[in-house]
Amino acid sequence: MNQALRDQLLAMKQQVDNASYEGEALEPLDVNYSTKMRSIHGNNARRLNDIIDELDSWPTVAIVGEEGAYAAWSIAQYASEWPALQRKFLAVLNVAAARGEVTQRQLAFLLDRVRFNQGQPQFYGTFLDWDAAGELSADIEQIEMLEERRKAVGLPAYEFTRQRQKEEISKVGGRAPYDWQAYKSAQQQWAQKLGWR
């Protein structure tokens, strides 16, 4: 295992964790998403890209241990402001997952994130968002196969996850947007500006 690389990935993730503990939002369209958090996410995404190029592969469990591989995945998840990098991360992670070098669960989350950003239905329903009725939900492709797909990658039932996330958001005072149309319009503008759609 490459201990130095593992430690570097953990330190990168810790920067994000520390900033979020200080009240900085993790997602670009959240009210508290700041220049500081964008800078951290951008620096982390570029460094992860360099690491992938240096290794000529994803930083897998064999290379950086479970915690290091999880940190790399977490960094990739928050690279939505850099579409080319996040798409590259998905492609490289997909190869590693096919070889059994990272979990299928991590691949599921990143795949859904990229599909959401591109305005496409998700496969696993891992990225929940507010719908017009004020509920958390996901637009899901072939929804009749959803639970089977989730089970195959080690995810709990969709409804369980949806209710748990709703409870977590409620605990911190989160709520559905007052003006859902404006909220969706802002998402669309953001995605178009960055080249996701």
Image (cartoon, rainbow, N blue to C red):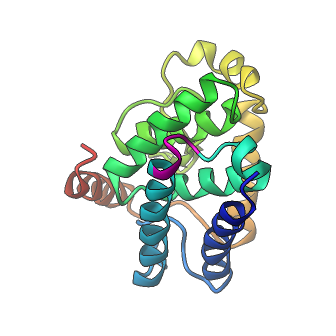
6 left or right, relative to 19: right
Q: Is residue 159 above or below residue 147?
A: below
Q: Is residue 55 magenta?
A: yes
Q: Nearer the viewer, residue 126 or 174?
A: 126
Q: Position of residue 43 (x, y in %)?
A: 44, 71
Q: Is residue 5 visible?
A: yes
Q: Is residue 125 visible?
A: no
- The secondary structure that dominates the magenta segment is loop
Q: Position of residue 142 (x, y in %)?
A: 51, 15
Q: Nearer the viewer, residue 147 or 155?
A: 155
What span is colored magenta in the figure? 54-58
Q: Position of residue 1 (x, y in %)?
A: 76, 51
Residue shown at 50% from the left, 46% from the top: 133
Q: Is residue 129 above or below residue 95?
A: below
Q: Is residue 28 above or below residue 94?
A: below
Q: Nearer the viewer, residue 140 or 54?
A: 54
Residue shown at 45% from the left, 34% from the top: 91
Q: Position of residue 30 (x, y in %)?
A: 47, 69
Q: Is residue 154 magenta?
A: no
Residue shown at 72% from the left, 26% from the top: 153
- Quadrant placement of the C terminus: top left
Residue shown at 53% from the left, 51% from the top: 134
Q: Is residue 131 above or below residue 159?
A: below
41 left or right, relative to 127: left
How many numbered circles are shown?
0
